[in-house]
Image: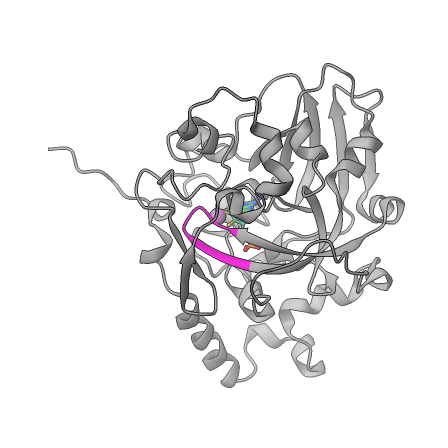
Amino acid sequence: MLIKNIHDWEIPESQATPEHVFLNRRKFMAGLGAGALSIGAGAMGINPLFAAESKDPTMDLYPAKRNMAYKLDRPVTEEELNLTFNNFFEFGSSKRISEEAQKLKTRPWEVKIDGEVEKEITIGIDDLIRKVGIEERLYRHRCVEAWSMTVPWSGFAFSKLVELAKPKSSAKFIRMETFVDPDVASAQKPSVFPWSSQSKWPYVEGVTIEEARNDLAFLVTGAYGKPVAKQMGAPLRLALPWKFGFKSIKSIVRFTFTDKRPISFWEELQPREYGFWANVNPKVPHPRWSQATERVLGTGNRVPTLLYNGYGDQVAGLYKDMKLRPEVLFR
Ligand SMILES: Nc1nc2c(c(=O)[nH]1)N[C@H]1C(S)=C(S)[C@@H](COP(=O)(O)O)O[C@H]1N2
Ligand SMILES: [Mo]
């Protein structure tokens, strides 16, 4: 008899620890005082999960001016929740990686732009941020695990990076990569998880050039009016609110312009479940659960999921000429 081995990353969100349970656990632990968490920062009354950010060289740019064109239909998710409920598999397969992620060193941080471009560029994150400038946008986020959140991101339109890159006409896709450093990100060590040997770090994601040029595609440098926290993908992370959350790659070090469709980290691991397009569609179920509704983090509410996560006006045009079957287009 074949017994299917269910790995951590295959457990639907509905079976994982609900966020309020471990939020309360965190508050309980904070109540005990001291502990490794509060070294230094705790004494100053700063949440230790923000501590590194206070030294951020772009601090003076925050809070960035809000772009009012991007509106929400629900309240912003509590910051504490977004800081303590994360998917960042480099640091572990649970949602509670925020403390582990503080090991990530986000300066100096270089971003490489290469491939089918006029000239390859390597640029420091602070130079990049000052060159393009930042604004604030309120976005929804829908994880493929059927939970959602809303975030006040700061950052810049992906189109600005495309402009800077000067792609050749042969460039059709952009492949993005997260850092690799097993000394910092322990889950990148072979054999930490049963699936580590199958997974090929770095975390990779990809988009078409047209998707990257769409106004909604946003490169995140901040959240909640300050530089983005490490566990949320500092110092540079993507936000593609019409696609499932796994497309929104964190801690990016490289953008490669290419004529070939990139194969993402998840697609390589499980192509049936995590495809290239990954546009949010309530009518196409995940092979192991429905995508019709979502749990809104921090509220206890379950609400209907919307096509393109409610952003159809801005993005449906990108896909109108595609002759793909819905399950291919959306998965
Ligand atoms: N490098 C990297 N980026 C990543 C992930 C990851 O594991 N590694 N997880 C993705 C998933 S599945 C989601 S839902 C979001 C979660 O972002 P959050 O932790 O800020 O909520 O990040 C995405 N980006
Ligand atoms: Mo996700």
Q: Is residue 40 visible?
A: no
Q: What percent of the width, then of the height, locates residue 14?
A: 34, 57
41 magenta-colored: no
Q: Is residue 79 above or below residue 201?
A: below
Question: Where 245 falls versus 173 (above or below)?
Answer: below
Residue at the far top in the pictured view: 170
Task: Estimate the x, y position of residue 243 in percent, counting from the top left.
Answer: 54, 41
Quarter-wise, where is residue 122 in the image? Answer: top right
Residue 204 location in percent, x, y?
Answer: 57, 34
Residue 60 visible somewhere in the drawing: yes
What is the total number of numbered labels drawn onto the structure image?
A: 0
Magenta extent: 142-149
Q: Residue at x 76, y 36 (%)?
A: 159
Whether the magenta-drawn stretch holds residue 146 is answered as: yes
Farthest residue in the left direction? 1
Instruction: Please give the name of the residue rendered at 71% of the width and 19% of the height, measured from the top-left corner.
Output: 171
Residue at the image point whose x is 50% and y is 62% from the top: 85
Q: Nearer the viewer, residue 313 or 279?
A: 313
Query: Is 285 positioned to the left or the right of 266 in the image?
Result: left
**Which color scheme does this rendered protein use?**
one colour
Residue at 60% over, 66% down: 76
Give residue 227's quadrant in the image.
bottom right
**Viewport quadrant of the N terminus:** top left
In the image: residue 302, left or right of residue 4: right
In the visual, does 153 lie left or right of 187?
right
268 or 212: nearer the viewer: 212
Which image quarter: residue 18? bottom left
**Whole-percent x and y of residue 91?**
52, 51
Quadrant of the rendering where the C terminus is positioned = top left
